């Protein structure tokens, strides 16, 4: 797994993909295996700067897993999304069907660092 080694506040062009997942316990192993395969694809793409996976340890949130992927630019993030879709097509993976089969609920989004005014 590629760990995050980028100082997040140092580069205003950095873009972040943050995805939150509610994963039933009986689907966790299969989902995590698919997530690791996805990371192998991401790590080979231009502009990839790192990735972290967070597992909730407390609090009321329904999301038990959160992923954070860092990209050098909006263009790199957009290209990565297209590359992942193409990869899924090549291997015959239907993400929507898999999430439904695993009963996973998710919220996905792109973000940038909010910097205080100078």
Image (spheres, rainbow, N blue to C red):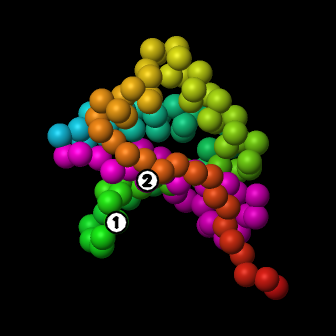
Q: Residue at x 76, y 58 (%)?
A: 13
Label 2 crowd bin: few (<14), some (14–19), many (20+), radius 10 Å = some
Whole-percent x, y for residue 23 in the image? 29, 47
Q: Residue at x 69, y 71 (%)?
A: 114
Whole-percent x, y for residue 61 in the image? 34, 65
Q: Residue at x 57, y 33 (%)?
A: 44
Residue farthest to the right, as pictured: 118
On residue 20, the disc is 2
Q: Are marks 1 and 2 in contact (CB under 8 Å)?
A: yes
The answer, for residue 88, to whether it is visible in the render is: yes
Examine the residues drawn in magenta and state their main secondary structure: loop
Image height check: is 118 above or below 103? below
Label 1 crowd bin: few (<14), some (14–19), many (20+), radius 10 Å = few
Identify the image quadrant of residue 115: bottom right
State how far apart marks 1 and 2 are (Cα): 10 Å
Give the magenta-colored segment's residue range: 1-25
Image height check: is 47 above or below 93? below
- Of helix, strand and loop, which one carries label 2? strand
The answer, for residue 53, to whether it is visible in the render is: no
- Identify the mark nearer the N-term, 1 or 2: 2
Q: Residue 4 magenta-drawn?
A: yes
Whole-percent x, y for residue 77 in the image? 67, 43
The N terminus lies in which quarter of the figure?
top left
Identify the image quadrant of residue 8: bottom right
Q: Nearer the viewer, residue 33 or 89?
A: 89
Residue 90 placement, left or right of 59: right
The C terminus lies in which quarter of the figure?
bottom right
Residue farthest to the left, as pictured: 26
Total marks shown come to 2
Q: Residue 96 magenta-drawn?
A: no
On residue 61, the disc is 1
């Amino acid at each position: 797994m590629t760990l995050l080694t980028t100082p997040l506040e140092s580069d205003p062009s950095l873009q972040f993909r943050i995805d939150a997942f509610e994963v039933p316990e009986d689907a966790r192993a299969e989902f995590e295996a698919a997530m690791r395969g996805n990371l192998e694809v991401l790590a080979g793409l231009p502009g990839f700067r790192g990735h972290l996976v967070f597992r909730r340890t407390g609090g009321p949130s329904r999301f038990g897993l959160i992923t954070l992927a860092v990209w050098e630019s909006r263009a790199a993030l957009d290209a990565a999304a297209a590359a992942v879709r193409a990869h899924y097509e090549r291997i015959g993976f239907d993400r929507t069907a898999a999430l439904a089969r695993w009963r996973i609920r998710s919220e996905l989004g792109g973000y940038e660092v909010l910097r205080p005014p100078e």
